[in-house]
Structure formats: structure tokens, C-alpha cells
Amino acid sequence: MKKLVAYITTGYPSLDFTVDMALSLADNGVDTLELGIPFSDPVADGPVIEKANLYSLQNGFKLEHLFKASNKIAPHIDTLWMGYFNPFYHRGVKYFIDRAKEAGVNGFIIPDLPYEEAKIYQPLIKSNNLSLIDFIAPTDTKERIEMITKDAQKFIYLVAYAGITGAGQSEDLQDTISLIKESSQTDIFVGFGVDENTAKDKAKGVDGVIVGSAFVKILLDEHLSNIQKIDKISSLAKEIKNKINE
């Protein structure tokens, strides 16, 4: 069965909501949860997730809130922390490793940390039985794909197009998927621009999809109560999971 990875922004609209939302997603087809670490300059994210980041920070988000929520979430669903390298650099990667292990979090997604720089931290992360997810883009050469995939852990994050999340663009990924499969047995998940309308197509030839902006749009809908947001996002997750496995 193909898998569904869901991204939500930690702390928006509240920390309690994040926990309730995560647990509901676990019950509605989501296999892995990306807990987003709010950051003031999320360079890989489009305006939807950027806005949720800003609102969470304005609500007073601190790293301790991430750890507190993770303690309640990680025992119930495979959990990764998705964040930009700035906090990891300032606090230290070892600090995040220790806190992840305490909470039961299984690894990190750091989109602005290139493979060449990530190699410095990979041995420490791997020796602590955690994963650092690698990114591959359709613009990567065969040589670069071979280099990245040889050490890939957990899954490979295949970026659906060159750009930011939520842009809704489309590219033919089949050549890139074939190149990845030539050099790696690691699962391939497609992210960027995945929603209920595109998920079935984007899931072709891969092991799963990653959905972020489609969920966060609902988080930002001020016309919905928190209960309605949870219900709507959970229903969408179930719909996407069904579509990628049709």
C-alpha cells in the first residue's frame, strides 16, 4: 500500500490543536507526520505554509512547544521534524538528536541543508538510529542522484518541480524516478503540489506522497472552528490515501 506523509505547522492555531490534529491524522490514513518547526524565512515553502509559520511565531511558538507536542504525538505515529537549518545550527544538531530520542521522533527533514553539507551530520544522526531525509529534484543529474541515493535513509523526498511548495506546477517525473530506482531500493515519496486533485497522478511509480499546503490551507481558514478544521483535514487525508491506492 502506498503511504501518505502529512505536514502540519506546529503551534498553529494552538499547541493543543496540533496534538489533536496529529492524532486524528494517525487515525485517518496518514503513515508519517512532518511536524513543521515555525521559522521566519521558510525558503522552500509557498505563501500558505509561510503564513502559518508567521502566525505560529506571533502566537509565541518556542522550541519547547515542539518537544512538548512531540512527546504526545510520536508514540502514536511515525514522526519527523521538518525545519530549516538555522535552529539546528544555533542549538546544535546533537541537541536536536537528544530531544528527538527523548520524544520518540524518528528523524529530520531540513530542506535548506544541501547533501554536501548534510554529510557532515549524517554519521552522528545515523548512529543515533535517526534519519535525515534526502531531497532529489527533477533537475538533478544522474551522477548527483547516484551520489545522494547511495546513503538515503527511510525515504527519498522527490521534489515534484523546481520551486516552492503549494505552487501547483507539474513536471514529468518518470525519468527521475527510473534513475533513482537504478541506484537505490529506498522508498520514493513525491512532495510539492500534491493535493486531492493531483495525488493519484503524482503517486505513479513511487511509494507514497507528501501533502502539506493542502492541509495548511484548511488550518488557515478562519471561517472554520478548530473541530471543523480537524474533521475537514482528516477527511481530506483519508480521501488522498484512498486515491493513491486506487
Image (cartoon, grey):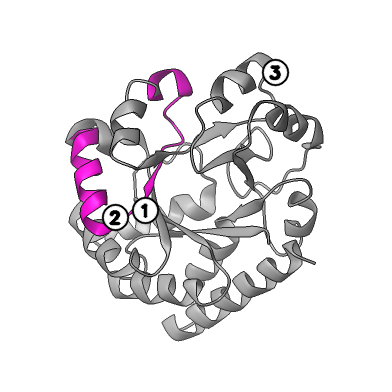
Dot 2 and dot 1 residues touching (CB under 8 Å) = yes
Mark 2–mark 1 Cα distance, whole angstroms, equals 5 Å
Circle number at residue 142 = 3
Mark 1–mark 3 Cα distance, whole angstroms, equals 37 Å
Circle number at residue 54 = 1
Dot 3 and dot 2 residues touching (CB under 8 Å) = no
Between 154 and 86, the one lying in front of the other is: 154
For label 2, the residue is 57
Dot 2 surroundings within 10 Å: few (below 14), some, or many (20 or more)?
Answer: some
Q: Tell me which amino acid carries mark 1.
A: Leu
Dot 1 surroundings within 10 Å: few (below 14), some, or many (20 or more)?
Answer: some
Name the residue at 21% across, 63% down. 68
Quadrant including the N terminus: bottom right
Inspect the magenta stretch and tell me whether residue 15 lies in it. no
Name the residue at 62% across, 20% down. 146
For the question of whether residue 223 can be seen, the reply is no
Instruction: Please state the extent of the stretch shown in magenta in the rendering.
Output: 92-118
Mark 3–mark 2 Cα distance, whole angstroms, equals 40 Å
- Residue 238 placement (x, y as % from top left): 63, 74
- Residue 98 placement (x, y as % from top left): 19, 45
Name the residue at 20% across, 55% down. 102
- Residue 245 placement (x, y as % from top left): 74, 64
Q: Tell me which amino acid carries mark 3.
A: Lys
Name the residue at 28% across, 30% down. 124
Dot 3 surroundings within 10 Å: few (below 14), some, or many (20 or more)?
Answer: some
Task: Determine the secondary structure under disc 3.
Answer: helix
Q: Quadrant of residue 173?
A: top right
Asked if 5 appears above or below 150 in the picture, the reply is below
